[in-house]
Amino acid sequence: MAVDGKTLRGSRTPDGTVHLLAATRHDTQTVVAQRQVEAKSNEIPTFTPLLSELDLTGLMITADALRTQQEHARQIVADHGHYLFIVKGNQPS
């Protein structure tokens, strides 16, 4: 399952555009969960609530460097899932 965020083109709210974080199945490209990212925030705090809605047992979760956070990895493992994250300069060690 891939976790990624997208801004909805053409959307408008009093705070700007709508930005969503979604969990999508790799095999069917079906969105199985999504949450709106709070205005003036980023996707990192939305990751945990998004995945807490799902049964991660045996699933491989993929995400890009923005979501490569130690707490995210711990959550996935605690929920009996696996992860494949991109590691860049945001994780120096």
Image: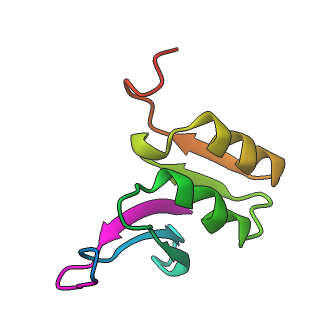
Q: Which residue is drawn at 56% across and 42% down?
A: 84
- Please say whether residue 58 is one of the residues in the magenta stretch: no
Viewport quadrant of the N terminus:
bottom right
Among the 4 quarters of the image, the one containing residue 69: top right
Q: Which residue is drawn at 51% across and 39% down?
A: 68
The front one of 15 and 54 is 15
- Residue 2: image x %, image y %? 50, 61
Compared to 3, does 91 lie above or below? above
The front one of 46 and 40 is 40
- Please say whether residue 9 is one of the residues in the magenta stretch: yes
Q: Residue at x 50, y 67 (%)?
A: 26
- The extreme left residue here reads 10
Q: Which residue is drawn at 19% across and 80% down?
A: 9
**Which span is picked out in magenta?**
1-13
Among the 4 quarters of the image, the one containing residue 89: top left
Compared to 69, does 92 lie above or below? above
The front one of 14 and 30 is 14
Among the 4 quarters of the image, the one containing residue 88: top left
The front one of 36 and 40 is 40
- Residue 48: image x %, image y %? 64, 57
- Residue 90 shown left or right of residue 14 in the figure: right
- The extreme top residue here reads 93
Q: How did the renderer colour the structure?
A: rainbow
- Residue 67 shown left or right of residue 61 in the figure: left
- Residue 10 shown left or right of residue 62 in the figure: left
Compared to 44, does 4 lie above or below? below
